[in-house]
Image (cartoon, rainbow, N blue to C red):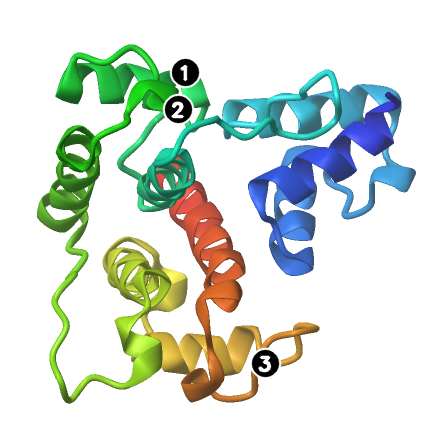
Amino acid sequence: MSAIAAIHVARKQLGLDEDTYRALAVRVTGKGSAKDMTEAERQRLLEEFRRRGFKKASTGSRKKLEGRYAAKLQALWISAWNLGLVEHREDSALLAFVKRQTGIEHVRFLHYPEDANKAIEALKGWMAREAGVDWSVDKFMPDYAREPGCKIARAQFAILHRIDPAFAEMNSLVHWLLVSRRDRPGTPAHIEDFHSEHWPAVMNALGEKIREAKSA
């Protein structure tokens, strides 16, 4: 795989939107396009991507873990990474966490809800305590606000509001979505129209901004 192709794979794996990618590329290499970089500059950018969690799989894509509860645990683990709690986003780190919580070696061996819930609730509790994720739901809450992705994105926004001066003028997650993502293909015009499939891109973009702010 060429360096340019690897950069595109890394960008997709890390969930970087166009503006975030270009800002990072300029900071690392002084150039906003991989085509304009020297090979040494491309390698510097790839090294930065690897520092942020990029792993080049032999198939070119990330292999999904097997198991009844694997998808949910992977989603929670990546969410914790995007909140700045998890240092390593790799599945090996998730499996080590699951073993600590349950004593079970691999998520594919989580056959019973009571075992899986030990790891799931431990992750959710950690995210609530350390990152301020509010998992509560009430009957007056609109549908979009019930989505776990929205709850995580709100916590991410609150973290950025505290640590990143660029967010000082943003008064809410809705404001940020309106200003920064209204022209993204496939992004609803109103937060009321956001569903589960829309939140991963938002969480990935906010996660990248959290990691940038913490590394500055």
User: Quadrant of the rendered structure where residue 74 is?
Assistant: top left
Q: Circles 2 and 1: CB distance less than 8 Å?
A: yes
Mark 2, mark 1: which one is toward the viewer? 1
The residue singled out by tag 3 in the image is 182
Residue at the location (50% across, 30% down)? 52
Mark 2 residue type: His
Q: For mark 1, does the 10 Å Cα neighbourhood hold few (<14), some (14 to 19), or many (20 or more) residues?
A: few
Q: For mark 2, does the 10 Å Cα neighbourhood hold few (<14), some (14 to 19), or many (20 or more) residues?
A: some
In this picture, is 53 found above or below 147? above
User: Quick one: label 3 or label 2, which is nearer the N terminus?
Assistant: 2
Residue 10: horizontal and vertical position, in percent? 67, 34
Residue at the location (56% across, 87% down)? 189
User: Quadrant of the rendered structure where residue 134 is?
Assistant: bottom left
Quadrant of the snapshot with the N terminus: top right
CA distance for labels 1 and 3: 36 Å
Q: Is residue 44 left or right of residue 3?
A: left
The residue singled out by tag 2 in the image is 88
In this picture, is 204 found above or below 119? below
Residue 169: horizontal and vertical position, in percent? 35, 77
